[in-house]
Image (cartoon, rainbow, N blue to C red):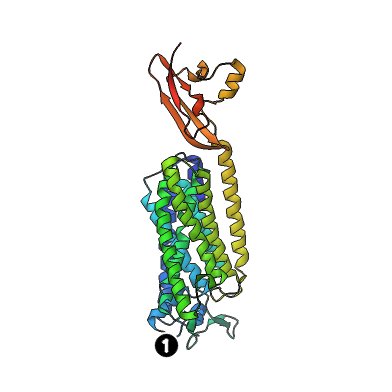
Amino acid sequence: MYAIGVGIAAILSRRPLLNKSSRQAGMAVCVLIALAMGSLVYLFLTDNFSLAYVVGHSSRDLPTFYKFAALWSGQEGSLLFWSWLLSIYVFSVLYSYRAKHPELMPYVGVVLAGVQLFFLILNVFIASPFKVLGALGPGGAMQVITQADGKGLTPLLQYPEMVIHPPMLYSGYTGFTIPFAFALAALLGRYPGEKWIHVTRKWTMIAWCFQSAGILLGAHWAYAVLGWGGYWAWDPVENASLMPWLTGTAFLHSVMMQEKRGMLRVWNVWLVFSTFLLCILGTFLTRSGVVSSVHAFAQSNIGPWFVGFLGLIVAVCILAFLARSKSSCRPRHKLSLDSYRSRTGSPSGTSLPPATTGASTISAFRCVRGIRVSRLSISCPTRAKPCLNPRSVMRRNALWSCCPSP
């Protein structure tokens, strides 16, 4: 909450100290969640059966190898593990770009803090792994109960890939938060140019590699343990993990078109948004109990929270996109060659009116459906002025030329 509030204040006031305070608060969250993770791991390894989560997913005779993996075998622990992985990504981004992109990073920090806040609310108030077993004592006071042993880990989960498959998959899911934050920040902050694309491509590749490894490990696990005959024999929850991988793959390919030719800008933004939304959708299907699956958790009250979060993300993305669409195409010099000809009757090849081309340098924007897609600029020597080649107006790169002054 502090990182979000101070981050918004930093954006509005443009004070570097507020921006620094918000960034440090976001980085401190990683340390605090790491402490919570370390505490839960210690409770598992020491067989502390006064904790409901440890009782439900561990036992004294469970090998240490699986006691560590039992951390993410249930609803509560896996959500805490998700928050920890997300905090590592957030810490890495905030620290790596602490002195770069000063106009963009405040927005990125606020978006990342907002996503973190949602999962931390679930960890603290909805699905906490630190609930203690207790009963009312004779005087009405709550007394802690410690059981002799726990229920143990489900036999189906006692497989070596249980240790590596969920972390890989979760690292892919949480990693796609970073390109989402940069894309949304670029829209909210009206950030010009292609810099955010260059940044997000690297983080998207990292998340995509983790997601690919997680899917392949899950496919082998399902084939070896459950005897499923192929990928498409998987249940809906496992197929849901493929959807963000597909959109992430499409983004990695189409972003090259934007970097080299300035194309597919709108398409790339929505590919990033769709990838993150599909990650949250897959998490909702797994944790809400809506879909019956061996990979899904039991019925819980966590589903409406994810539905509300999905709706909020969709609304924010649409509003940010529409706001950027209306404001991004405001050229410094409004170019309308056809209207100028209709008013003056000038033949093709004539230059623009002196009010527009009086300077030796002119800049303009080319817009497609309200989105600025390229910047045009030309400098002409003394005795020449900029004019527009009418044959190239409809081409992707409208060409300016220098025409001799009459």
Q: Position of residue 176 (x, y in %)?
A: 47, 57
Looking at this view, is 358 or 8 the one in front?
358
Q: Quadrant of residue 122?
A: bottom right
Q: In which quarter of the image is residue 103?
A: top left
Q: Position of residue 393 (x, y in %)?
A: 51, 29
Looking at this view, is 154 or 241 the one in front?
241
> Does 188 sit above or below residue 221?
above
* Residue for point 42% across, 51% down: 201
* Residue for point 46% across, 30% down: 376
Q: How many residues crowd around disc 1 within 10 Å: few (fewer than 14), some, or many (20 or more)?
A: few
Task: Decide if residue 257 is in sight here.
Answer: yes
Q: What element carries label 1?
A: loop
Task: Decide if residue 196 is in sight here.
Answer: no
Question: Label 1 sits on what residue type?
Answer: Asp
Q: Position of residue 322 (x, y in %)?
A: 59, 43
> Does 216 sit above or below residue 394?
below
- Where is mark 1, residue-wise? 61
Q: In this view, does 312 lie to the left or right of 400?
A: right
The residue furthest top is 406
Q: How many marks?
A: 1
Looking at this view, is 323 or 115 the one in front?
323
